[in-house]
Amino acid sequence: MSEKGEVDLTGAKQNTGVWLVKVPKYLSQQWAKATGRGEVGKLRICKKGNQGKPEVSFTLNEELTVIDGIEDKTVSAPREHPFTMQSVGGQTLAVFTETSSGQSEERSDGSSSGSGAGTGPDKITLEGVVVQRAECRPAVSESYMRLKRLQIEESSKPARLSQQLDKAVTNNYKPVANHDYNREYERKKKEEGKRARADKQQVLDMLFSAFEKHQYYNIKDLVDITKQPVIYLKEILRDIGIYNVKGTHKNTWELRPEYRHYQGLKMHWTMRWSFAVPSHSVGTKIKGTMEKSEVRH
């Protein structure tokens, strides 16, 4: 309803009474199919005696009984619709119509509202005050039961249906026996399994030599340099290195502070090792002693 506009209260002055009727959804849809202001049905009001309540029923026109579009079938709507009368219940209800400027609307009594010309604001008209409430219900019949059954079946259908394919879809994605990344992982795993563990001292020499060139290495590069299994290499790195879990050099290894002057340590190691060569058992004992002395140094 527009915020600005005139309100025609002619219906209130004439004390026009209207009925507020609740109708089924299918009935309102069939009324909308009527061409122009054509007739949609007949309303019968029968009163038995002076004290009895009036019996009201609505009969739908035969040409509006055909309902299409339910499961691709044609269904006939019931024609007879008796009314269940109800009181207004102390409420004040009214019916308004809104007419756009420049348009005229024919009223229910045959008169015309609106000037039919002009570009002024929309006009609001009071058609009448509700004096009776009612509910229009279809009479129970075979056609009505069939209509409700089809409506229930239509509403219970799933939005998505599974469909069995006669042949495989090959125009988008083709199934493969094994993906490339799986083959690459298996290849690396086989190469690592073939690598034999070298002597710990030999691995240490390769690591110290690598860290002379760069301060930080990731585990993948160290595996390529030493050609050792990852698990074995990490065991050695935990003794001499630090794994960075954050910062600029995240996920990389570097030497511990006590091993960062590794050139002097390496020379000292070589001199003591040559001294331990004459006796194997004594050399082994001296080797363990020298490892501890290097850590203190």
Image: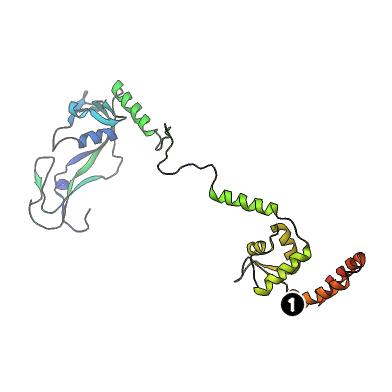
- Residues 144 and 268: in front is 268
Q: Name the residue under label 1.
A: 263
Question: Is residue 238 shown to the viewer in this render?
Answer: no
Residue plotted at (20% across, 47% down) = 96
Pinpoint residue 116: horizontal percent, then vertical percent. Answer: 7, 51
Side (left or right) of 153 relative to 205? left
Side (left or right) of 8 relative to 76? left
Q: Is residue 115 above or below residue 259?
A: above
Quarter location, residue 149: top left
Pinpoint residue 207: horizontal percent, then vertical percent. Answer: 71, 68
Element under label 1? helix
Side (left or right) of 178 relative to 277? left
Residue plotted at (7% across, 53% down) = 117
Pinpoint residue 39: horizontal percent, then vertical percent. Answer: 14, 32
- Residues 90 and 201: in front is 201
Which color mode does the image show? Answer: rainbow
Residue type at mark 1: give it.
Gln
Name the quadrant of the C terminus.
bottom right
